[in-house]
Image (tube, rainbow, N blue to C red):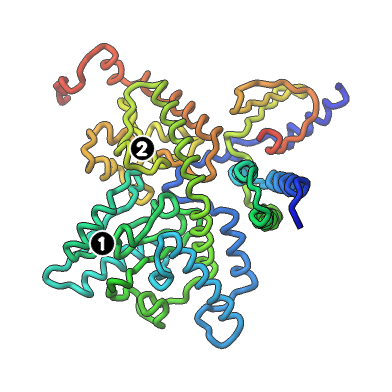
Amino acid sequence: MAASTAQVLSLYRKLMKESSKFPSYNYRTYALRRVQDAFRANRSVEDPKMVEQLLNQGRDNLDMIRRQVGLPQTHAHTHTVCVCVLEARDASHVLVYTYKTKDVFYFNFTFSIHESTFV
Amino acid sequence: MTQYYGVVTELIKSRELENDELRPLYMDFQATTPMDPRVLDAMLPYQVNYYGNPHSRTHAYGWESESAMEKARKQVADLIAADPREIVFTSGATESNNMSIKLLEGTIRQDTSLVSVMTVNNEIGVRQPVEDIGRICRSRNVFFHTDAAQAVGKIPINVSDWKVDLMSISGHKIYGPKGVGALYVRRRPRVRMEPLQNGGGQERGLRSGTVPTPLAVGLGAACDIAQQELEYDHSRVSMLANRLVRKIMSEIPDVVMNGDPEQRYPGCINLSFAYVEGESLLMALKDVALSSGSACTSASLEPSYVLRAIGTDEDLAHSSIRFGIGRFSTEAEVDYTADKCIQQVKRLREMSPLWEMVQEGIDLKSIKWTQH
């Protein structure tokens, strides 16, 4: 059965979705980046056997990531200095620093304070 | 929008991050490395369900454990182009090093000696010319041991090409578990060994003691992953290292990189910041996990013996910081580290009377310091 583009894309999306669930900043960024780079590098592979082999590798990795993000994360540290620093000014404003852009945003609406928002 | 005020207040109150909730960035990959999730994934079954002793010969628990151990052995061997029969599992590179030295006591002849060299230095990242050393040792009939803890999985290794007789491998330097390592012992020409640890005769009598299957499996998985990822990791680490060094050196003067610029592993960067004390810079960079020299000697206040050996001036040796970049480092972490480093060096130099004198054009070496 020849692998279709749809299959490849579906696997890619699943991998990216699962990878974004790592609580650890370093594991999460690595997984997202590695998946993206691997798919990019193998973009022009034509041999159907090779494609099938790569897809199987991808599926194994997907299972592995699912198992790893499913582990109890009681000791996983989620906040490293790099991601963001939150400061409450008053009830209506929240100051957010992002190290990537060094911008300062003022928000007066609710947003999810989950690390993955900023990565 | 006003309806959200109440929610925001609550969110802020419950999620205000304390300072100690923020962990520093990890930039000390030479000291140790986090386990790769793939390594942990490989190890878990053997920590939970497949708990048999690999040396038990009479039941499935033993057989499956042994099979996993032998698979791991092959993975380690493949990474350094060796035969699996030449790999002995140990508790780490330190034990492997000690075992190799014991060889000297076991087989000493008039003309036998042992050359022992680190493949990649852990403080300045310099790579030794092991191929040349191996060739010379082989021609003089001298055993050659190398501690490849910082090199395995980071640069291509071939024990046959390098003519290495003994090689130490460490698990926790290559994103594997702590407490396990390996020793490569050449079979042809045979290297006869005296065991350091006696007991039940495991590992061909060279290292008695039950091989810890989960740890061995972890080491094997780490080696397997390292082989797959070697090129990708190397180019990425090189890119990040260049980014860090270029950023720092372009913003502040009087920064020296210690160690050969060409013959090195890029992920270990040792910089000396003139007129700034190393320890105070480390303390100032408290949200980045760094070190000034090797972890094994960090308890002492002496400057690094490696820097002294390469002829670094005493004052520059005291000003050195080691930046470690690894598989999981990000551009954001490198940029943050560089920015913080530049900022703190500038601040510390502002406070330094030596720096003031240098700015005025005084040559520090010409000063005659008097005693009070």
The picture places residue B205, in percent across and down from the top left corner, at 37, 79
Q: Residue at 49% of width from left, 37% of height from top?
A: B288
Identity of the amino acid at label 2?
Asn
Residue where numbered disc 2 is placed: B270
From the viewer's perspective, is the residue at label 1 or at label 2 nearer?
1
Q: Residue at x 27, y 44 (%)?
A: B306
Which residue is disc 1 drawn over? B144
Q: Find the residue positioned furthest to the bottom.
A: B58
Q: Nearer the viewer, residue B21 or B261?
A: B261
Pick whichever, A67 or B18, lies toward us: A67
Q: Residue at x 50, y 71 (%)?
A: B212
In the rendered image, the quadrant that contains the N terminus of chain A is bottom right
In the shown orientation, is residue A49 left or right of residue B246? right
| Secondary structure at numbered mark 2 | strand
Residue A95 in sight from this viewpoint: yes
Chain at tag 2: B
Left or right: where B292 falls relative to B74: left
Mark 2, other Cα within 10 Å: few <14 / some 14–19 / many ≥20: many
Tell whether B7 sits left or right of A51: right
Q: Is residue B353 above or below residue B320?
A: above
**Residue B303's spot in the image, x, y percent?**
28, 41
> Relative to B48, does residue B317 appear above or below in the rendering?
above
Chain of the residue displaying label 1: B
Q: Position of residue B64 (x, y in %)?
A: 59, 77
* Mark toward the start of the polypeptide (1 vs 2): 1
